[in-house]
Image (cartoon, rainbow, N blue to C red):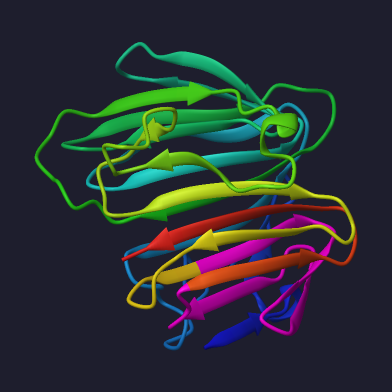
Amino acid sequence: MIEVRPFASLGGENHGWLNAKHHFSFANYYDPKRTNWGNLRVWNDDVIAPNSGFPAHPHRDMEIITYVRTGAITHKDNLGNQGRTGAGDVQVMSAGTGIAHAEYNMEDVPTTLFQIWIQPTRTGEKPSWGAKPFPKDDRAGQFVVLASGFANDNDALPIRTDARVVAATLKAGETAEYHLGADRRGYLVPATGAIEIEGQRANARDGVAITGVETLRVTAIEDSEIVLVDAA
């Protein structure tokens, strides 16, 4: 099954400093048909105004992955971690038994990002944070694993859950394949461009909910940047 969820159908709210769109129920947006996708709980499409951001706040028992599309986000937490994650790169925060963090756009331009929350398989562990650059040239024409809960994905940022976050950059006309597995759930969003997947078109920032597909074939209609969560 392939269900395209157009960007215009997403919930959300414009707070001025933050313009947030929610693929799943979040904050004041609730849709009983869109509460999660397997263990994928949140996919927020955020635009953060320059020199603003999220002040310190707590989390626990959640894997929080931030994929920066444009601009940069600066992280600071009560463990002493601090870092700047730029466009195309990824940060992972395993909230574990509890962490407080702040995320600020300290740039002079808006920052756009995907904030992805996946429910952990392992709980009761110490919180952690990490970030890593993923050059777009390295994922040209193919899917590359950015974050993973599987031991054999050695180059990916570790997460404590039965899931992967993968990405690809495709030129118009290029096709990339990803082995999902018919018993898995996929959720795919083109950050830019437009794609065709299993005969259906998805435009930039649309969501694509996928079940029962052994191997995904994604073809770029336009030059595209694609992010996919492989969920349990």
Q: Is residue 52 above or below residue 144?
A: above
Q: Is residue 168 left or right of residue 204?
A: left
In the image, residue 29 above or below residue 45: below
Q: Is residue 85 left or right of residue 125?
A: right
The picture places residue 165, in percent across and down from the top left corner, at 48, 49
Q: Which residues are magenta?
A: 187-214
Residue 188 % position (x, y): 59, 65
Front-lying residue, 87 or 24: 87
Seen as rendered, the residue at the extreme left is 124
Looking at the image, residue 100 lies above or below residue 139: above
Q: Tell me the residue at 88%/67% (across/down).
A: 221
Position of the C terminus by quadrant: bottom left
| Residue 56 visible in this rendered orientation of the protein | no
Examine the image and state in which quarter residue 137 appears.
top right
On whether residue 190 falls in the magenta region, the answer is yes
For this rendering, which residue is in front, 161 or 95?
161
Q: Quadrant of residue 78?
A: top left
Q: Which of the pair 223/67 is nearer the observer?
A: 223
Q: Residue at x 44, y 27 (%)?
A: 155
Residue 149 appears left or right of 50: left
Q: Position of residue 37 (x, y in %)?
A: 41, 73
Task: Identify the residue at horizontal 49%, vertical 24% (top origin).
Answer: 131
Q: Is residue 226 left or right of residue 126?
A: right
